[in-house]
């Protein structure tokens, strides 16, 4: 899963949500999908946090150059 880029992870998360919402999954499959969704959510959160840090750093560098 970590090889996927952010957009692909979001797309996969949407698919998981749709499958869970359609109510056609068994309990075991629902639990597995939920666990996978939690993992993807954590990976996306980390990606966003890193992007935010990078943007702040770049803004600080830009501010120093002015």
Image: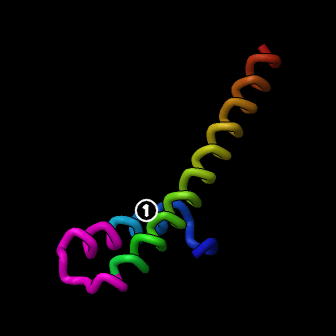
Left or right: residue 41 versus residue 14 is right
* Left or right: 48 in relation to 22: right
Q: Quadrant of residue 57?
A: top right
Location of residue 10 with respect to 49 vertically, above or below? below
Question: Residue 20's spot in the image, x, y percent?
Answer: 27, 72
Task: State the image coordinates of residue 59 (x, y, percent, origin top left).
Answer: 70, 26
Q: Residue furthest front?
A: 27
Q: Which residues are magenta?
A: 15-29
Residue 16 picture quarter: bottom left
Q: Is residue 24 magenta?
A: yes
Q: Please determine whether, in this image, residue 6 is positioned above or below residue 62.
A: below
Instruction: Give the quadrant of the C terminus.
Output: top right
Q: Residues within 10 Å of mark 1 (few under 14, many from 20)?
A: some
Q: Position of residue 58 (x, y in %)?
A: 73, 32
Q: Quadrant of residue 14?
A: bottom left
| Vertical order, 53 against 41 (above or below) | above
Image spot of residue 64 (x, y percent): 81, 17
In the image, is residue 8 part of the stretch drawn in magenta?
A: no
Which residue is labeled 1 in the image? 10
Depth check, front residue: 62 or 40: 40
Name the foreground residue: 9 vs 25: 25
**Camera-nearest residue between 40 and 35:** 35
Up/down of 3 relative to 10, above or below: below
Element at label 1: helix
Residue drawn at the location 66% of the way across and 35% of the way down: 55
Task: Name the residue: 62% across, 44% down.
Answer: 49
């Amino acid at each position: 899963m970590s090889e996927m880029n952010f957009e692909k992870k979001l797309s996969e998360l949407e698919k998981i949500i749709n499958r869970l919402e359609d109510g056609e999954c068994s309990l075991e499959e629902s639990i597995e999908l939920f666990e996978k969704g939690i993992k993807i959510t954590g990976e996306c959160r980390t990606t966003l946090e890193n992007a935010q840090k990078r943007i702040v750093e770049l803004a600080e560098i830009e501010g120093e150059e002015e």
